[in-house]
Amino acid sequence: MKNKVHNFSAGPSILPNIVFEQASSAINNFNNTGLSILEISHRSKDFMDVLEEARSLALEISDLDANKYSCLFLQGGASMQFLMTAHNFLNKNAAYINTGSWSTKAIKEAKLYGNVTEIASSSDKNFNYIPKDIIINDDYDYLHITSNNTIFGTQFHSFPLSDSPLIADMSSDIFSRKIDLSKFDLIYAGAQKNLGPAGATMVIINKELLDRVQREVPSMLSYKVHIEKDSSFNTPPVFSIYCILLNLRLIKQEGIESISKKNKIKSDFIYNEIDRNKCFSGFSEFSDRSIMNATFNINEGFDVDLFNKICSNNNISGINGHRSVGGYRASIYNALPLESLNILIDAMKEFELSQE
Ligand code: PMP
């Protein structure tokens, strides 16, 4: 059994206990094959069934038409998608909204392939907000956004309207809230937050996009090849995909609507405490606060070391903010139980009392 540590890490991050239990059991004996999930062939029927179920569940949970969209599990992390999206779709000019470090990195990669227009950015305020009222005049190859900014704790709560295909990096808020995913033409998400362990990246792609590229695409970078080869052009990350499947089954069972409500409740709890407690201030603008990553700082004059000590006494792990923001970041992904959040909120209250 794992020790009870309250894991607020931004990723890799907490997963449901049942996923840990089922994955552990599959490490010993997968599907009664007498083989471990770590040694089974990716060409075996048992694993091909895993892949097929994971793919179809992801599309079902997304409420997307399986004839129109394909779901892939690739390697290279979300960072590989920064360049794969551009390599496959940037012919002349692509639009990007820059809302943080990950968008900045996506823009850097895309510039290797063509013209990139940064149509909006929140860099003027260290990315503590989401640009609004974005007007998209030109015809772009695509518009790229980062739906949730893991580092800064901001999130798009409504999406820009665009005639160009919409591509979103949803690494840190995939399947956390009810949104109309049919507005998107390509979604990607590194697994290691709301999906599973690091190793696989889920990509959901509108197949109509596939034939637009005008350049040669190496096989490993080609969405078309990965679709034709059922995510098995090369050896897929078997264990990561298996854990994703276990988690997708739970997500389907609970339903996105219920998950969405729970996440709203959890994020209201933590933000209410940040706003109420005289020792802390939130980092991001109210209207753009992320329901997945709550960023906050200790106000001047309060004893940072003592708060860190209270956190460690309570087995609170992973709440240090990213170096570009400082302070704290509580990542409250789907699997984080309310119990853990309450422990953190109690620690914040205890700290406030100690500072009287
Ligand atoms: N995009 C976002 C929104 C992220 O939070 C991260 C970090 N996990 C990345 C991209 C980069 O992901 P990876 O490390 O899987 O390349």
Image (cartoon, rainbow, N blue to C red):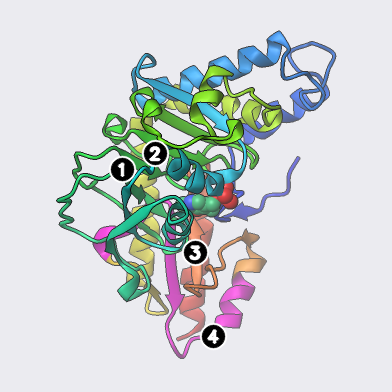
Do residues under tags 3 and 4 come within 8 Å of each other at their CB atoms?
Answer: no
**Residue pointed to by mark 1:** 142
Q: Residue furthest bottom?
A: 301
Assign a secondary structure to mark 3.
strand
The residues colored magenta run 286-310
> Which of the two residues, 23 or 68, is positioned nearer the viewer here?
68
Closer to the observer: label 4 or label 2?
2
Do residues under tags 1 and 4 come within 8 Å of each other at their CB atoms?
Answer: no
**Residue pointed to by mark 4:** 303
Answer with mark 1 or mark 2, whichever residue precedes in sequence: 2
Assign a secondary structure to mark 1.
loop
Answer with mark 3 or mark 2, whichever residue precedes in sequence: 2
**341 left or right of 237 in image:** left
Answer with mark 1 or mark 4, whichever residue precedes in sequence: 1
Assign a secondary structure to mark 2.
helix
Q: Residue at x 39, y 51 (%)?
A: 114
Q: Is residue 79 above or below residue 47?
A: below
Q: Residues within 10 Å of mark 3 (few under 14, many from 20)?
A: many
- Residue 206 visible, this orientation: no
**Residue kind at label 2, given as amino acid type:** Phe
Q: Is residue 225 above or below residue 45?
A: below
Closer to the observer: label 1 or label 4?
1
**Residue pointed to by mark 3:** 329
Do residues under tags 1 and 3 come within 8 Å of each other at their CB atoms?
Answer: no
Can you tell which mark lies on residue 89?
A: 2
**Residue kind at label 3, given as amino acid type:** Arg
